Image (cartoon, helix red, strand yellow):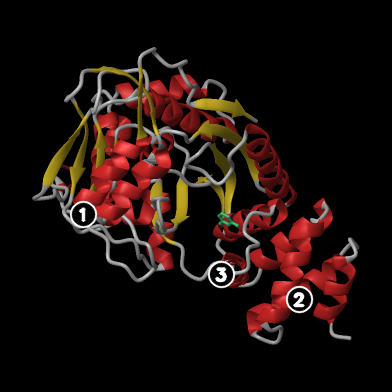
């Protein structure tokens, strides 16, 4: 019997897979000797029966070691499980770099309503997300911050994830945990913070699911020699005001320059930066973060980083803008109770800010600016959102109105930060 068939037989009865079996199956699938139909059967057995911690770690390790890997033991990195308007990397990483913690980050593009740091950075004129390895390393040493597109890291995860996506096996805790940590382990940072999103606009819908995933991510990382911690943050409403690539870069640079932003964004960016500095041994990280912000050092770091990756001076003040904008107005008066992240994300997607398929071309200037946040009082006819872009503006307006829930009574304030592990 082949190893993969043995693994299917064992797992369908709830048995345990040995580390060498996991490794052989992963290698076989990556090189093509294990066919899709057998891997699909195994993934479904794992989905139904689960995997214990040892099996999950073996899968993580096998996928992490399936392609090229980097090593930046002194560097910090963060990973968000994905959200709408999530620009925390663009804010927190210049802050920690300004505090002396080097950042070597490999990021991805957005897909669907989940934005990607690489698309956001590419909206900056002249910015290159593709640096040769030597230049990437030099920039981490000299500037303290470099972010490039993740290429062929953990190719086994890439192949398995594509199969999971078409076989109903994405939402399995051991498969999600091993998938995320395998990519982070291959990027090689020695200190990692996970930002696990919980809410209607996120993968994890409940506190319990988010806490379970956060615990698994930290445990797997530490087993692989990475110092790790996690925060659980809300994703019922988009973070901050801006949703869309250049719009989010503008909001992030504005925050670092001292412009006011919504409190959920400011609080989460400060927390993530503090947690990253704590992982590096900073004894008073909150104070370091405030100093980097108030002195202007974090904003200077952002400018230096974008220039180092090819943007001309002043690029952050010359971000692309859309020739077409329209305002969406409140259909009634009252208090904004909710601005549902998923439909705001879908509206940004309709305007051209994201891709439905990997091959779609995005409009860097497109997106949504929220002009009201939960708790705000609005009159009928007040502008509540501004749409940028012209692809499907009518549909986007409908989605914004579906996302918006206005009530007579003010809502209970929803905390942006739900847990801190
Ligand atoms: N993100 C990943 O990288 N992998 C998953 O399985 C789910 C989310």
Q: Is there a contact, CB below 8 Å, between mark 3 and mark 2?
A: no
Q: Which of marks 2 and 1 is nearer the N terminus?
A: 2
| Residue 25 badge | 2
Pointer 1 residue: 311
Ligand 1 is located in which of the four quadrants? bottom right
Q: Relative to 120, is 371 above or below?
A: above
User: Is residue 18 visible to us here?
Assistant: no
Q: How far apart are labels 2 and 1 at the CA level?
A: 44 Å
| Residue at (76% x, 57% y) in the render | 56
| Residue 162 badge | 3
Q: How far apart are labels 1 and 3 at the CA level?
A: 34 Å
Would the CB of label 3 be found within 8 Å of ligand 1?
Answer: no
Quarter of the figure that contains the C terminus: top right
Q: Quick one: 32 or 256, which is closer to the camera?
A: 32
Locate residue 55 relative to residue 250 in the image: left or right: right
| Residue at (60% x, 71% y) in the render | 163
Quarter of the figure that contains the N terminus: bottom right
Q: Relative to 180, is 36 above or below?
A: below
| Residue 351 badge | none
Q: How far apart are labels 3 and 2 at the CA level?
A: 16 Å
Instruction: Mark 1 vs mark 3: give the one in front.
Output: 3
Picture coordinates of residue 235, whole percent (x, y):
48, 36
Picture coordinates of residue 179, whole percent (x, y):
63, 59
Q: Which of marks 3 and 2 is nearer the N terminus?
A: 2
Picture coordinates of residue 53, whole percent (x, y):
81, 51
Q: Which of marks 1 and 3 is nearer the N terminus?
A: 3
Disc 1 crowd, CA 10 A, few/some/many (<14, 14-19, 20+)? some
Q: Quick one: 373 or 119, which is closer to the camera?
A: 373
| Residue at (59% x, 31% y) in the render | 281
């Amino acid at each position: 019997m082949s190893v993969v068939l043995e693994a299917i037989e064992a797992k369908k009865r709830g048995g345990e897979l040995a580390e060498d079996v996991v490794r052989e199956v992963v290698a076989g699938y990556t090189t093509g000797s294990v066919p899709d139909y057998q891997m699909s059967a195994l993934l479904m057995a794992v989905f139904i029966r689960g995997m214990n911690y040892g099996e999950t770690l073996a899968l993580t390790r096998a996928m992490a070691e399936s392609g090229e890997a980097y090593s930046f033991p002194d560097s910090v990195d963060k990973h968000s499980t994905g959200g709408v308007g999530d620009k925390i990397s663009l804010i927190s990483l210049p802050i920690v770099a300004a505090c002396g913690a080097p950042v070597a980050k490999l990021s991805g593009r957005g897909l669907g309503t989940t934005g990607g740091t690489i698309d956001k950075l590419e909206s900056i004129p002249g910015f290159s997300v593709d640096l040769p390895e030597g230049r990437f390393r030099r920039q981490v040493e000299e500037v303290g911050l470099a972010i490039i597109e993740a290429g062929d890291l953990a190719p086994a995860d890439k192949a398995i994830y594509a199969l999971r996506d078409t076989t109903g096996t994405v939402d399995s805790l051991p498969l999600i945990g091993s998938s995320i940590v395998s990519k982070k382990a291959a990027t090689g940072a020695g200190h990692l913070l996970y930002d696990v999103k919980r809410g209607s606009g996120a993968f994890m819908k409940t506190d319990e699911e988010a806490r379970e995933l956060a615990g698994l991510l930290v445990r797997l990382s530490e087993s692989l020699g990475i110092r790790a911690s996690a925060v659980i943050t809300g994703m019922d409403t988009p973070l901050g005001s801006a949703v869309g690539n250049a719009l989010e870069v503008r909001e992030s640079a504005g925050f670092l320059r001292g412009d006011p932003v919504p409190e959920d964004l400011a609080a989460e960016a400060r927390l993530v930066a503090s947690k990253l500095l704590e992982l590096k041994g900073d004894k008073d990280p909150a104070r370091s973060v405030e100093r980097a912000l108030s002195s202007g050092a974090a904003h200077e770091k952002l400018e230096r980083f974008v220039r180092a990756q090819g943007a001309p001076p002043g690029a952050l003040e010359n971000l692309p803008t859309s020739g077409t904008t329209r305002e969406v107005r409140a259909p009634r008066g009252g208090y904004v109770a909710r601005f549902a992240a998923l439909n705001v994300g879908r509206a940004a997607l309709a305007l051209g800010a994201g891709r439905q398929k990997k091959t779609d071309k995005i409009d860097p200037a497109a997106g949504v600016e929220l002009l009201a946040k939960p708790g705000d009082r609005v009159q009928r006819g007040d502008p509540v959102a501004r749409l940028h872009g012209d692809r499907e503006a009518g549909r986007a307006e409908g989605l914004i109105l579906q996302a918006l829930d206005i009530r007579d009574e003010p809502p209970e304030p929803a905390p942006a930060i739900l847990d801190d592990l």
